[in-house]
Structures are given as structure tokens and as C-alpha cells.
Image (cartoon, helix red, strand yellow):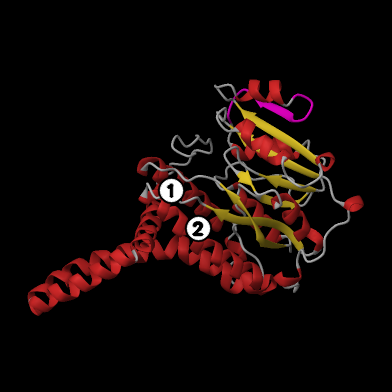
Amino acid sequence: MNLSQSNIGMKSFSQSDLPMVSILIPVYNEESVIERRINNIFESTYPKDKLEIIVIDSGSRDNTRSIIETNFQNRVILIREDQRYGKAHAINLGLGVCKGDIIILTDGPTLYDKETISELVNSFRASSVGGVSALYNVPLTGKSHVVDSEHTFWLHKDKIRILESRAYSTSWLSGEACAFRNKTITKVDEDTLADDSNIALQLISKGYRVIVNEETYFTEGSPSALYDYFKTKVRRALGGLIETLRFNSLLFKRQYGYFGLIIFPYRFFAQLISPIASAITIALAIPAVIESIAYLGIYSLIIGVTLLSIALILRHTVIAYIYTQLISLIALFMLLTGRVDVRWTRSTTRS
């Protein structure tokens, strides 16, 4: 359990002992991307005879199923759900049939680098590792401050995930590239909105390390419309908050090393305490600013211009922070008011 990140993935499997990999793709109305996604997996450097692709279609109303049946007959296992019960339910259907030693959970709009699957598998050479993810590359378009903010957010978040991985474990296994050992997870809690966090925290609670492979990445476009962005991010934040509370028994537990003493408490702070503290701070700051303006006079204008200039220079970071705090507050409100629906909808502005 004390193996350092630098020792993970340094050796390569030989061609003869490469493990079988099952790739699970839960989908709903993904006709515009599903063919590209499956072809992208087949373009991987990982041997095709070691890949098992399982698509779980949860009641799609478009041509997702017919595209798979027409273009990938006998190459892809298609599980059909006539009714949507939620992504976790779809994942559990896939877990029931997959034969691989390693399972990789991914999404329809995601794209992998050619080496991504090989790199994820290589990380499992360390017996202490139960789960692995890749870095998230959000393409910058230069056309939307929403996408630019998401790019900044993930640059920051991936740095944290890397530090957590090196110290012990990260609790953030991105659902776009969520790899874990078969049989370590037999079922995802079906009331979850964050299957990747549920899987990661299950693995950690069972004594496995969960890490990020720093040598590879996945790409997925971010919603470009503000409403679509907020809807997607609020759902993710709500899911993460639910899992943090579900696995609160990990908090400050020495048997989980740095994860129990530092990493998970930080997650608890970032998701629950920080947004509440930010809201209280802003509420208290408004009368203080008004009083300062009256007291300082012209100097308050100089201070205001200086702060505004700094904010403009760091605008992407500032906007990302404001979005994150606001989204966390909305997610907390939805949790407290019971507005939780495990069924997912596809982003309408994600490329």
C-alpha cells in the first residue's frame, strides 16, 4: 500500500500476458457520437483480441441501437434496456456479463489517445492499485468563456488528483476513463449520480489505491451553453456530494493513511463547507464594502480598480471559482430538498 506513483506502470506487460479488458459504454441517445466512440476504441494500440466492448443502451429514442447493430455486428455486445433506470443500473447490467480482468467505464462522447487503454492497464501492475483514471483534456475553443472556465477547472482539479494519487489515493475516478479490477466492484449503488466516485470510494474502503495515470489522457468536449453547462455541473456536484456523505465513515480514519486524514477531509471541505462559507462571506462582505467606501472615499475607488484589474487578469480562474461555488450551493440545496433523479440526459451543446 506504500508503493509510490513513480513505480506504477514502469514495466510493460508482455504480449502474451496482457489481460483481457472489458469496456462498458452506457448510452442514451448517442447516435451522433457512438460510431466515432467505438471506432476510437478499435484504433487503440491495445490488441483487438484482448478487448471486449459492451454497450448498454438505456431506452434510446434515436438511431443509437441501429447504428451499433448495422456497423458493429458480432464486434460489440449490445445490452438493451427499454426503460431508463439510471446510469448505475446500466453499469450493473454490464458488470453482470463482462469477462475482462480489467473493466474500463467510459462515455459515448469521450475520445481516447491511442495509448490510453494500454497506459491504464499498465497501472495495474502494482497489486495495491484497484482503480485508475486518466487526465482530462478539455479542448479550448476560444469562443466560449464557459468552455474556457471548464478547461481551467480541470487543469486545477487534475493537479489535485495527481497530488492525491502520489500521496495515497484520489477519490475522483472520471467516469469517462474509469478503470478497475474485475470482481473488486460487483455492484454500483443504483441511487448514485456519481458512479465514478462510488466506484473509487468502494475500492478505497476495501483497501485498494485509486490513482491517476499521468502519462495519458482522454478528451471530451464541454457544454458550451451556460444553461447546459450549469445543468451538467450541478448534477455532477450533487452526485459527488451524495457519495461524500455516503462514505463519511472514511473521514479521519488512520487505516486509510493520508486519504483518511487529509485527502477525504479536503473533499468534504471543498464540497460541503467551502460553498457555505463563501456564501456567508459574501453576505457579510456587502455591508463591509459599503461602509469602507463611505469611510475611505477616493481611496476605495483606487482599491476597487486594482482589485478589478487583478480579477480581469485572472478572469478564467475567477470565473471558474465562482461557477464552482455557485454550483456546489445549488447542489446542496437540491440534496436538502430531495430533488434527485438518477436518470441522465445527454448534453445538447457538448461536441
Earlier along the polypeptide chain: callout 2 or callout 1?
A: 1
Q: Secondary structure at mark 1?
A: loop
Q: Measured along the vertical axis of the image, is residue 328 above or below residue 186?
A: below
- Image quadrant holding the N terminus, namely bottom right
The residue that label 2 is drawn on is: 154
Q: Measured along the vertical axis of the image, is residue 199 above or below residue 258?
A: above
Q: Which mark is residue 304?
A: none
Q: In the image, is residue 69 part of the stretch drawn in magenta?
A: no
Q: Measured along the vertical axis of the image, is residue 70 above or below residue 296?
A: above
The magenta-colored residue range is 73-84
Q: Secondary structure at mark 2?
A: helix
Q: How many marks?
A: 2
Q: Position of residue 56 (x, y in %)?
A: 67, 32
Residue 215 location, quadrant: bottom right
The residue that label 1 is drawn on is: 141
Residue type at mark 2: give it.
Trp
Residue at 61% across / 32% down in the picture? 34
Q: Nearer the viewer, residue 12 or 171?
A: 12
